[in-house]
Image (tube, grey):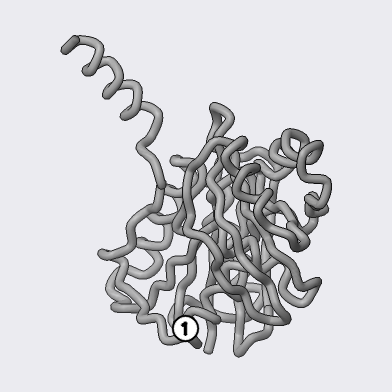
């Protein structure tokens, strides 16, 4: 079974190929270029290095969100183009869940995804990593950092923070929660390798892939432009 995975939900962008549980090719960049410039060339290079073509791929995996509104849209649009007319072959995964797979085989712990949602909020979800498996403990949500601290205070196990909001949460919450651990940079951010591993476990657990027409971005909250328009409309009606 061959899985092609992509991610561009935050600053980094990446593409990876998984064949029967083994990563056979991966490309990663975090140099500030727009994802519309980097994602497709990296995907092509990942295939080229593995000596594969799109027709050889069985399933396509993607971080469907949450994340940067622009990045999530670019990733979804790119995968829709790659899988047009391919039928049910897409495995969308949670960005927060895929980051927990950074710790598979590294250590058993609770992994908390924390992506910067601006205005002192984070997109977050908590997962338990045990051996080669990941178990979801909380649903993905967008909450204030202080609320995340209150939720984590109830836990009594090792807690590792990952994501582009991890350092912000660590600096804010560590004085009250000395047991928090900030993941090192090489394990902190989204990576298509982990997207592929997450998708493989979902398939193993019986997930039914979807078609490109059914692939939808996951935002968790409305884009800023929509929120500002709603506030203006509410102000005008008062």
Any part of residue 36 in sight: no
Q: In this orientation, which residue lies closer to the viewer: 59 or 34?
A: 59
Give the quarter of the figure containing the C terminus. top left
Horizontally, residue 204 falls left or right of residue 226, namely right
Residue at the (41%, 46%) spot, across then down:
220
Q: Residue at x 55, y 65 (%)?
A: 137
Q: Residue at x 51, y 46 (%)?
A: 67
- Where in the figure is residue 27, as x and y percent of width and height? 67, 62
Q: Within the image, what quadrant is residue 226 found in?
A: top left
Q: Position of residue 123 (x, y in %)?
A: 53, 45
- Horizontally, residue 90 falls left or right of residue 6, namely left
Q: Where residue 71 sits: x, y (%)?
A: 49, 45
- In the picture of the structure, the residue carrying the numbered disc 1 is 203
Front residue (pair 82, 114): 114
* Circle 1 crowding by C-alpha within 10 Å: few under 14, some 14–19, many from 20: few
Using residue 134 as the reference point, say whether residue 94 is left or right of it: left
- Residue 42, picture quadrant: bottom right
Q: Secondary structure at mark 1?
A: helix
């Amino acid at each position: 079974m061959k899985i092609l995975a992509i991610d561009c939900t935050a600053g980094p962008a990446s593409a990876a190929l998984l064949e029967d549980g083994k990563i056979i090719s991966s490309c990663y960049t975090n140099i500030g270029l727009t994802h519309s410039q980097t994602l497709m060339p990296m995907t092509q290079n990942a295939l080229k290095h593995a000596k594969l073509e799109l027709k050889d791929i069985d399933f396509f995996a993607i971080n469907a969100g949450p994340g940067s509104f622009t990045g999530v849209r670019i990733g979804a649009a790119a995968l829709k183009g790659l899988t047009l007319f391919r039928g049910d072959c897409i495995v969308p995964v949670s960005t927060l869940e895929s980051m927990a797979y950074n710790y598979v085989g590294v250590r058993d712990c609770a992994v908390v995804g924390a992506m910067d949602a601006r205005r002192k909020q984070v997109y977050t979800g908590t997962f338990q990593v045990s051996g080669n498996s990941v178990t979801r403990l909380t649903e993905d949500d967008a909450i204030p950092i202080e609320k995340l601290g209150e939720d984590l205070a109830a836990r009594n196990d090792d807690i590792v923070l990952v994501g582009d909001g991890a350092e912000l949460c660590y600096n804010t919450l560590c004085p009250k929660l000395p047991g928090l651990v900030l993941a090192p940079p090489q394990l902190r951010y989204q990576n298509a390798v982990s997207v592929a591993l997450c998708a493989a476990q979902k398939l193993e657990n019986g997930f039914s892939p979807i078609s490109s027409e059914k692939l939808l971005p996951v935002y968790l909250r409305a884009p800023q432009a929509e929120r500002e328009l709603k506030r203006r409309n509410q102000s005008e009606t008062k």
